[in-house]
Structures are given as C-alpha cells and as structure tokens.
Image: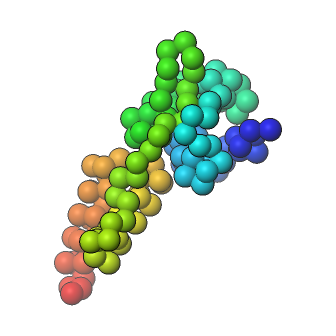
Amino acid sequence: MTPLDSFEIDYSSGLPVWIQVKNRIAYLIGTGEYVAGDRLPTVRALAVDLDISYNTVNRAYMDLERDGYITTRKGRGTFVAERHEVGAARATDTPLELLADDLIRACANSGMREDDILSFVEARLALRKMVGAK
C-alpha cells in the first residue's frame, strides 16, 4: 500500500483537482510519508488510480517539480527530490520573519503562486487602509 492509496479527490471543495493532487503529494513529502529518493507513481498510473485526466496529474507533477519537491529522470521515473527548506528558520530570524515565512508556506501549500501571494497581501493591506486599522 502506498501513501496515495487512501487519497480521494473532493469535487465539492472548489479547489481544482490538480491543486488537490499537488497539495496531497507535497503534504506526504512534508510529513515524511515519502522521503528523498522514493519513486512516485507514473503520471498515467496515478491518473488511472484517481480516475482523473492524465493532463491533470501531469500539471500537478510539473508544479511539484518546479517547486523542487520531485525530480523526473527520463526513462527511470519520478522521484522525491532532496529538499532544502526555503525559508527554514535561522537563529537570526525575528518573530515577524518567522510569521511571514509561515504565511508564505501556508499560501503556497494551498496552491497559491508567488504573484498571487503578493496580490493577496496587497489586498489585505488595502482593506486595512479602508477601515482605518493601525
């Protein structure tokens, strides 16, 4: 049994299927269910297992690879990559820097891209100005 065997798509969540797949795999890597060097199911096999489009799984895998979670070796398969946590806590980080890292990580884990995170923060700052918050 693999860590993805119990995964089910939630069609009522409003979250695109490819993001659900991406988030689940990133979560499994983050929690150690998959470790560096572990082989992931092929795009086709996972698409069949989840009863979703090949293109949907491929998009999730491409995003995971871009984000450094996985690596594809031509002719060998897709594997969990060695990760060096970007934004990992350093002894010199202030509490506000750690809080910002947590916000960025939470947004990224929910499927947001960097430009979406910036837009989100800007919108929240604009809202604070509108209501006169300090």
Q: Quadrant of residue 106 in the image?
A: bottom left
**In this picture, residue 8 sits left or right of residue 106:** right
Say which residue appears at 42% left-offset and 39% top-offset.
68
> At 27% across and 71% down in the image, what residue appears?
92
- Left or right of 49 on screen, residue 78: left
Residue lying at the far right in this picture: please name it: 1
Q: Nearer the viewer, residue 50 or 69?
A: 69
Task: Tell me the quarter of the picture where residue 4 sits.
Answer: top right
- The spot of residue 44 in percent (x, y) is 64, 21
Decide if residue 121 is in sight here. Answer: yes
Position of residue 43 relative to residue 122, above or below, is above
Q: Which residue is at 49% across, 15% downward?
A: 74
Q: Number of callouts in the render?
A: 0
Residue 111, percent from left and from top: 45, 49
Query: Measured from the top left, where is residue 26 in percent x and y?
Result: 54, 46
- Horizontal placement of 19 versus 123: left or right? right
Q: Is residue 51 left or right of residue 1?
A: left
Residue that appears at 57% across and 17% down: 76
Determine whether 81 is above or below 77 in the image: below
* Closer to the camera in the image, 84 or 108: 84
On the question of residue 47 being in view, the answer is: no
